[in-house]
Image: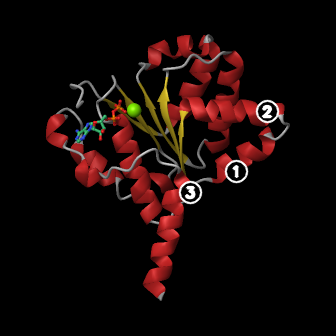
C-alpha cells in the first residue's frame, strides 16, 4: 500500500511536469559528448542543486542533447517527488503574455515561483521583444535564490540582447540566472 502510494505520487508528478518526451540519464551516451563534464552531471542528478536554488544552463547547437539532459534531470526530480514543470520557451512566453492580458500574471508568477524546478527549453529560436523579456525577467526574479531553473539555449549569452531586442533586459536576466549556476557549453556534434 505504502509503495503503491509513492508510485502514484511519482506518476502524478511525471504527468504534471509536461515533458514532451521522456529520456533518462541512463540513456544518455556521455562518450558522444566527451567535453561534457559527466561527473558533474551525475553529481547534479543527486539534486542537491535544487536545495541551493542553483540554475543549470545548457548552451549549444541543435541535437547536442540539451533537451535530453534537462528532461532526464527533471525526471530525477519527479522521482524525488519534487514539483517540476517543463515548458518550451515559446510555450512559456505565450502563457505569460496571456496571463498578463487576463490580469492573472501575479497569480501565475506565484505558481511558477513555488515550483521546485522550472525547465525552460530552447530559448533563442523565437525572437521575443522587450515586453517578453520583461516578463521573463519578472519570472527569473521570482525564482532568484528561491528555486532552480534549468534553461537550454542555442544562443551564446553575448547574443541574448538580440533575442530580447534589448541589451539591458538581457543583461538583467543573465545576471540573476548566472549568479548561482552551472553553465554547460556543449560544443560537440549533433546526435541526430
Ligand atoms: P537539443 O535539445 O540539444 O537540440 P536533444 O536533446 O533534443 O538535442 O537531442 C536530440 C535527440 O538525440 C534526442 O532524441 C536525444 O535523446 C538524442 N541525443 C542527443 N544526445 C545524445 C546522447 N549523448 N546520448 C543519447 N542520445 C542523445
Ligand atoms: Mg532541444
Label 3 SS: helix
Q: Earlier in the sequence, mark 1 or mark 2?
A: 2
Residue 139 falls in image quadrant? top right
Residue density around tag 1, few if under 14, some if 14–19, many if 20 or more, within 10 Å = few
Q: Residue at x 61, y 41 (%)?
A: 144
Residue 6, how many percent across, how many down? 47, 77
Residue furthest right in the image: 103
* Closer to us: 138 or 74: 74
Q: Can residue 60 be seen?
A: yes
Residue at image position (48%, 45%) is: 54
Q: Nearer the viewer's eye, disc 3 or disc 2? A: 3
The quarter of the picture showing ligand 1? top left
Q: Is residue 47 visible?
A: no
Residue 110 percent coordinates (x, y): 73, 48
Q: Is mark 1 within 8 Å of ligand 2?
A: no
**The disc label shown at residue 30, or none:** none
- Residue 189's x, y, as percent? 21, 25
Looking at the picture, how far across and down is residue 160, in whole percent? Answer: 51, 17
Residue in the picture at 56% in, 57% down: 16
Q: From the image, tell me which residue sits under label 2.
A: 100
SS for dot 1: helix
Q: How would you rate the neighbour count of disc 3 (Cα within 10 Å): few for under 14, some for 14-19, many for 20 or more?
A: some
For disc 1, the marked residue is 111
What whole-number distance in Å separates the C-alpha atoms at marks 1 and 2?
14 Å
Q: Outermost residue toward the bottom?
A: 1
> Would residue 122 appear left or right of 31 to someone viewing this image?
right
What residue is shown with label 3?
Answer: 16
Look at the numbered disc 2 and give the secondary structure of its residue.
Answer: helix
Discs 1/3, front: 3
Q: Are marks 3 and 2 in contact (CB under 8 Å)?
A: no
Q: Are marks 1 and 3 in contact (CB under 8 Å)?
A: no
Amino acid at each position: 500500500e505504502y509503495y503503491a502510494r509513492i508510485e502514484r505520487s511519482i506518476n502524478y508528478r511525471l504527468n504534471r511536469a509536461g515533458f514532451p518526451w521522456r529520456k533518462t540519464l541512463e540513456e544518455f551516451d556521455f562518450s558522444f559528448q566527451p567535453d561534457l563534464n559527466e561527473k558533474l552531471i551525475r553529481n547534479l542528478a543527486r539534486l542537491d542543486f535544487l536545495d541551493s536554488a542553483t540554475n543549470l544552463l545548457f548552451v549549444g547547437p541543435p541535437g547536442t542533447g540539451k533537451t535530453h539532459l534537462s528532461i532526464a534531470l527533471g525526471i530525477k526530480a519527479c522521482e524525488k517527488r519534487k514539483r517540476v514543470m517543463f515548458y518550451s520557451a515559446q510555450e512559456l512566453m505565450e502563457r505569460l503574455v496571456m496571463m498578463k492580458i487576463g490580469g492573472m500574471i501575479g497569480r501565475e508568477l506565484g505558481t511558477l515561483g513555488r515550483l521546485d524546478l522550472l525547465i525552460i527549453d530552447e530559448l533563442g529560436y523565437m525572437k521575443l521583444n522587450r515586453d517578453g523579456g520583461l516578463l521573463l525577467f519578472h519570472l527569473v526574479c521570482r525564482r532568484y535564490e528561491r528555486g532552480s531553473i534549468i534553461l537550454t539555449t542555442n544562443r551564446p549569452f553575448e547574443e541574448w540582447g538580440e533575442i530580447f531586442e534589448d541589451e539591458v533586459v538581457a543583461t538583467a536576466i543573465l545576471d540573476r540566472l548566472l549568479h548561482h549556476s552551472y553553465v554547460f557549453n556543449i560544443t560537440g556534434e549533433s546526435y541526430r
